[in-house]
Amino acid sequence: MINIMKGTKDLLPQESYKWDFIEREIKEVARLFNLHKISTPTFEHTELFLRGVGDTTDIVNKEMYTFEDKGGRSVTLKPEGTAGVVRSYIENGLSQLPQPLKMYYETPVFRYERPQAGRLREHHQFGVEIYGADTPQQDVEVMMIARTLFHRLGVPAPELHINSIGCPTCRKAYNEALKAYFAAKQEELCPTCRERLEKNALRILDCKEEKCAAIAAGAPSVLDYLCEDCSKHHEGVKDLLEKAGIPYKVDDKIVRGLDYYTKTVFEFVVENIGAKSTVCGGGRYNNLVEQMGGKPCPAVGFGMGIERLVLTMQSVGASFGEVPSPDLFIANIGAADAAFLLTMQLREHGVNAECDTMARSLKAQMKLSDKLGAKYTVVLGETEIKDGSVKVKKMADGTEETVKINDLAKYFIEKKD
Ligand code: ATP
Ligand code: MG
């Protein structure tokens, strides 16, 4: 017996309707906000992520699934969704399309992390990527996409935490200030943070070690270092959130785990889901397209973890919609082929019908129908075939109605409307 790999999960047939439900709502939100789907490969040249995600991040340093393929290329399984989209945007000349270009994706994501509740080595993300617009409106629209999805999924508005991490201009001074602050407390930092101090002090703010987090809490605030442009943008985002009646908290310690962010960063935070409570994280990355070899192009987006979304929905008792079940179960007495053919015929007409294909007794067939949750049942035997009609039994109340076999499809189609 070979077991599943640590940190990965099967999506089982009895659970998959929950994911289907979420995907349907994602599609509906995409329709409402005019987002178009983009899918990029599961693996890319390793170089893409080194450049795109940033080589001082945990993701690149510790978490990537990187291997050599049979042609000797260094390949990496995507550790986040944005880098591939940026590559595709440049490679396919998507700047030619009307801007802002509003896209979304659903993708598996691979990170070699320490597995815990809500932290997997393969997880899935719904992500939004909007290219071309640099206004506060665009940031707020992106936040509203996430909020709308939460609302439609029955998750009471999670807390929205926002920050601005400025642009390369204002971050230079901020980095100096951070370095000075942490250098004075160097001895108390974890070994990784001591390294970060050299390479990218901003990363220390994202450390999950308790000791480092406590020190980080007293660090200088990035908001005191914003340049005029970044500051105006940040005020614009807050102002529009207020006008839209969306509650938020400014948390000047949010930096996010990726190097590409500029200006706005944000998180949606929920309670009760075990190890971690950020379901959705995002922000603006105005320099990434250029950094990856394209023409300068502002961009903003987020990634939302589907597994954490499912955990959140379960913890608040949200509904995943109806558990799928057949509309009609056609049981038979000595007429298995006739029942099978009738089932097929109804399906051709768009009726969700089911029958037994395991030569069960009538009693066992009725038990199966019950387990499947069929809404109606009929029993097909010699008499019914001769009469050309069956008794349709409504399982909810046991009432019966006689219906001509030839009219069954129509009967169920009309019921549906
Ligand atoms: P965290 O701080 O929890 O490590 P992150 O900052 O690494 O999260 P992002 O890279 O922004 O997360 O990914 C976006 C979303 O994807 C997260 O908010 C979370 O819902 C989900 N996510 C990230 N890593 C994992 C994981 N290992 N397992 C499950 N979901 C994850
Ligand atoms: Mg992480």
Image (tube, rainbow, N blue to C red):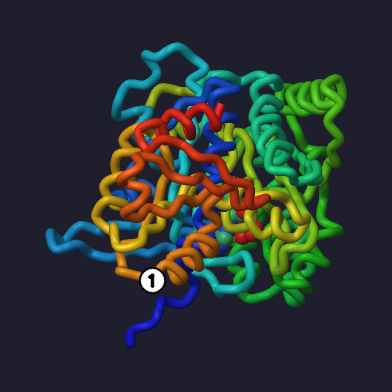
Residue drawn at x 60%, y 22% is 32
Residue lying at the far left of the rendered structure: 71
Q: Residue furthest bottom?
A: 1
- Residue 9 in sight here: yes
Q: Secondary structure at mark 1?
A: loop
Residue 343, percent across and down?
34, 46
At horizontal 55% and vertical 40% (from top left) the residue drawn is 401
Note whether 235 is above or below 308 in the view shown: above
Total labels: the figure holds 1
Q: Is residue 414 left or right of residue 45?
A: right
The residue lying at 55 percent from left, 48 percent from top is: 393
What residue lies at 49% left-to-right and 46% top-to-bottom?
391
**Residue 125 can be seen in this image:** no
Quarter placement of the N terminus: bottom left
Name the spot of residue 383 as percent of width and height, x first: 35, 51
To which residue does mark 1 refer? 361
- Circle 1 packing at 10 Å, graded few (<14), some (14-19), many (20+), is some
Residue 230: quadrant of the picture = top right
* Tag 1: amino acid: Ser
Quadrant hosting ligand 1: bottom right
Q: Is residue 347 left or right of residue 243?
A: left
Which is nearer the eye, 215 or 265?
Answer: 265
| Label 1 lies in ligand 1 vicinity (Cβ under 8 Å) | no
Is 256 rendered above or below residue 247? below
398 sits to left or right of 298 = right
